[in-house]
Amino acid sequence: MVFEKVKKIIAKELNLKEEDIQLESRLAEDLGADSLDAVELIMAIEEEFDLQVSDEAAQNIRKVGDIVQFLENN
């Protein structure tokens, strides 16, 4: 499941527990990701799923669910 993989990546990159990460969690406000964390997170997702995330798409990612939706649509 995409969400499970995304959760593992976010937990690793942001040093969080997987159970603290929900689909509706906001990356900055709820999970404490700053702009550098966001870039590293996108890079980790690109590597794991072997795809490119455009700058435009990355700017529209605010919640964990946004990442999952992007991956399911691409």
Image: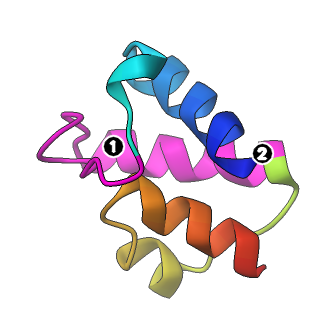
Measure the alpha-carbon separation of dots 2 and 1.
26 Å
| Disc 1 residue crowd, few under 14, some 14–19, many 20+, Cα 10 Å | few
Instruction: Specify the quadrant that holds the C terminus.
Output: bottom right
Whether 49 is drawn above or below 11: the answer is: below
Whether 17 is drawn above or below 26: the answer is: above
Secondary-structure class at tag 2: loop
Q: Is residue 18 left or right of residue 2?
A: left
Mark 2 or mark 1, whichever is nearer to me? 2
- Name the foreground residue: 1 vs 58: 1
Residue picked out by circle 1: 36
Q: Is residue 19 left or right of residue 69?
A: left
For the residue marked with disc 1, what is the amino acid? Leu
Residue 14, picture quadrant: top left
- Name the foreground residue: 33 vs 20: 20
For the residue marked with disc 2, what is the amino acid? Met
Residue picked out by circle 2: 1
Q: Which residue lies at the image location 80% right of the left edge and 42% below the top edge? A: 48
Whether 59 is drawn above or below 48: the answer is: below
Q: Please say whether residue 10 is one of the residues in the magenta stretch.
A: no
Q: Which residue lies at the image location 33% right of the left edge and 43% below the top edge? A: 36
| Disc 2 residue crowd, few under 14, some 14–19, many 20+, Cα 10 Å | few
Q: Position of residue 61 (x, y in %)?
A: 39, 69
Q: Is residue 42 left or right of residue 20?
A: right
Q: Which residue lies at the image location 50% right of the left edge and 41% below the top edge? A: 40
Q: Position of residue 67 (x, y in %)?
A: 53, 61
Q: Can you name the residue that lies furthest to the right here?
A: 50
Q: Earlier in the sequence, mark 2 or mark 1?
A: 2
Which residues are drawn in magenta? 23-48
